[in-house]
Image: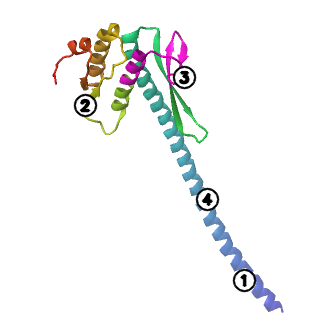
Amino acid sequence: MIEQLYENITNLETELVIAERFLNSNRITIAKEKSLIETFEMAKAYIIRVGEHTQKEVKKFIEDTVTFAIQTVHGDEYSFIADFNYDKRDQLEIKWFISKYGNLLEPRKDTISGSLTDVSAFSLRFVIHALEEPEPAPIFIMDEPFKNCSKKYIPLVSQMVKEISKLLNLQIVMCSHTDELIEMADNIIYM
């Protein structure tokens, strides 16, 4: 019986040594995994910071470019606001506003002139084009993009089109029935 107890003790001691080795091995694995998780958390935080910075830069580019176009045609009392928010599913949502003297006008809800709408839509197309990857062809073909602009704005529209074209290094081909806009074109092809 003593021999049996001695044998059981020896077996238990052996199992204890094996369990201690296994425990130490698991502690090392856990430490490595914790270190890996910390590295991933740091990388995640960095990616989030880069994403936030990029989003701010894109927002500024959009707002500055569209505001430039609007102010060139309609005056300094107008600006363009892009409101970046996350919805319930954490999907980025962008709402567009026209600001007039600091009052936000929402294009789908508020009454905004056709000219202001045309200029905003025109410049937004170019902004989106400029943000595309891989870089798209530097040519833009448009049909009557300023059909809602009154004749008094056409000289300013023409100036804005030329400035946007230079700013974004794009060639713009435009169809129009507006004689005043046609006269201000660099090249004219009649069909």
Asked if the stretch drawn in magenta spans residue 115, the answer is: yes
Q: Amino acid at mark 1?
A: Asn
Mark 3 or mark 1, which has the lower sequence index? 1
Q: Secondary structure at mark 2?
A: loop
Q: Locate the C terminus and report the quarter of the image it occupies.
A: top left
Please tell me which of labels 3 and 2 falls first in the chain. 3
Answer above or below: position of 156 versus 1.
Answer: above
Label 4 packing within 10 angstroms: few (<14), some (14-19), many (20+): few
Question: Which residue range is magenta in the image?
Answer: 96-122
What is the spatial separation of the Cα atoms under label 2 and label 4, in whole angstroms?
54 Å
Query: Mark 2 or 4 closer to N-term?
Result: 4
Alpha-carbon span between mark 3 and mark 1: 81 Å
Say which of 103 and 166 sits in front: 103
Q: Which residue is mark 4?
A: 30
Residue under the point 48% across and 36% down: 51
Residue 108 shown left or right of residue 129 in the figure: right
- What amino acid type should be assigned to the residue bearing mark 3? Lys
Between circles 1 and 2, the one closer to the viewer is: 2
Residue bearing mark 3: 109
Q: Residues within 10 Å of mark 3 (few under 14, many from 20)?
A: few
**Disc 4 residue type?**
Ile
Q: Which mark is residue 11?
A: 1
Residues under labels 4 and 1: Cα distance?
A: 28 Å
Place of residue 91 in the rendered image (x, y in percent of width and height, measured from the top left): 54, 39
Q: Are marks 3 and 2 in contact (CB under 8 Å)?
A: no
- State yes or no: discs 3 and 1 in contact (Cβ < 8 Å): no
